Image (tube, rainbow, N blue to C red):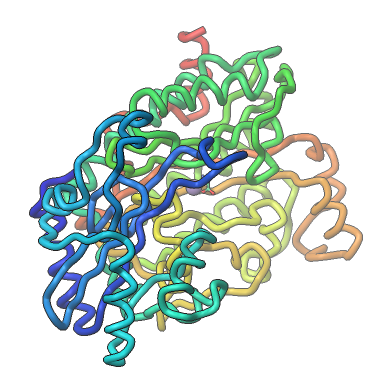
Amino acid sequence: MFTKEIYIARRALLKQKVGDGLILLFGNNDSPNNYPANTYRFRQDSNFLYYFGLRREGLVGVIDIDNDKEYIFGDDIDIDDIIWYGFVPSVKELAEDVGVSSSAPTSQLKVIIDSAIAQKRKIHFVPQCRHDLMIQLSDLIGIHPLSTKENASVKLIKTIVEMRAIKKPEEIAELKDAAEIGYLMHTAAMKTCRPGVSEKYVAGIIEGIAMSLGDRYSFQSILSMHGEIQHGYPSHTPMEAGRLMLCDAGAESKENYCSDNTRVTPISGTFTSMQRDIYAAVESAHDWVIENAKPGVKWLDMHLGACTIITEHLKAIGLMKGNTEDAVRAGAHAMFMPHGLGHMMGMDVHDMEGLGQNYVGFDDEVQPSTQFGLNCLRCGRRLQKGFVMTDEPGVYFIPHLIDLWKSQGMHKDFINYDSVEPFRDFGGIRLEDDIIITENGCEIVGDKIIPYHINDVEEYIKNNK
Ligand code: GLY
Ligand code: MN
């Protein structure tokens, strides 16, 4: 937990910006896996964590702006809980730890909410992604459980996005801790990767590092010889010489700030010339973004710039043709890179995505696109100092997509389908680093950069087998 003063100051600013009404922020409940006592590992809700800092399950925070009062609602443990889980402080003590003066049992929450509804006061809440909380909210305020998104407070959402988007020094320190763990995870993957070892074995090693050194891994690791599958989860299949292992994984620091990196390792230890050509396209796009991202620049333009570089490279090796600008405008490159350049990152690996992507990544100036590929860009708006973004261009050969586009004659003026054929079984390459926007540019989060230049990767593998 950060100091109590940090949470007090965050809530004071939230109150001031939202202006009036009552803010209701749910903490998460324990979530059963296959029976009630066998739960998924508890993870606190990020908004609750940001404003209240408490990690216990079953808590609800209320900020009554009109009466300048704050509450934590939750139930104290009983002797059965103590026997099974040990003693924990009371809800009152927890509330005091984060500067909240009032606490009450969960049953009292309805009394406060009923009274606010009777007074026709505004109740601000955010969309819920967990079904138990949808039901809890429905029960409290009488909306349909599936309508929390439509009924959520835009004022509250926009204020939270404004505050959480700019990372403060104490948050950057946590992001650096997560990056340090991410470095250890990815270098361990590079060391462990070899023919005959299964994808799942490598994933287990790196997830163990995240669990041992931080709070946990920041998302289910993507680790596969089939890098062309965007979320390709690891299997028991032994890895094959000559192929590539794509590893997209990260850690959460002790305070639940994330890292998210992708590296591609040649399973034999060295890249083939075909792999080098594709790798070079992705590497150039990745590095161009780091050279050009700065306050005031639109992330949409970083995305389009990266796509332009990739298109130029693919033209140079004969996979694409025609005018580069026209090809990118038409979205022809999206057969090779069907996703966005990157997303905000913080306490959520896709930071604040649960609040609604339009509020997080877009504004009146930059609106989301419906074009294939560009529609997966999670942020387009202008960068600000303190934003943390992922820079993650990639090139993939997705056989089903190639066949579909070829059969439809899609963008045939820009794609040399015959030249693409030898790449059908290539897989995919993505390179991902987390960057923080500084006064005049950006820098990669963390003190150590996971090797990614082609020769550095081969050298690292050679020296660490
Ligand atoms: N690194 C996983 C993702 O961005 O979806
Ligand atoms: Mn990512």
Q: Where is 402 relative to 382, above or below? A: above
Query: In this orientation, which residue lies closer to the viewer: 134 or 169?
Result: 134
Closest to the observer: 299 or 239?
239
| Camera-side residue of 346 and 152 | 152
Farthest right residue? Answer: 407
| Left or right placement of residue 70 versus residue 463 in this view | left
How many callouts does the rendering have?
Answer: 0
Q: Going by the picture, which residue comes out furthest to the left?
A: 5
Residue 150, above or below 170:
below
Residue 97 in the image: state x and y as whole percent. 13, 48
Instruction: Indicate whether 23 appears above or below 418.
Output: below
**Left or right for 167, reference 283:** left
Report if residue 380 is visible in the image: no
Quadrant including the N terminus: top left
110 sits left or right of 173 in the view: right
Q: Residue furthest front?
A: 79
Which image quadrant for residue 72? bottom left
* Residue 420, percent from left and from top: 80, 45
Residue at x 42% of width, y 42% of height: 42
Residue at (19, 53) in percent of width and height: 168
The structure residue drawn at horizontal position 59% and vertical position 17%, both measured from the top left corner, is: 193
x, y percent for residue 201:
61, 19
Which residue is at 54% across, 42% downward? 36
Between residues 272 and 30, which one lies in front from this camera angle? Answer: 30
Q: Is residue 223 visible?
A: yes
User: Residue 344 placed where, x, y %?
Assistant: 40, 56
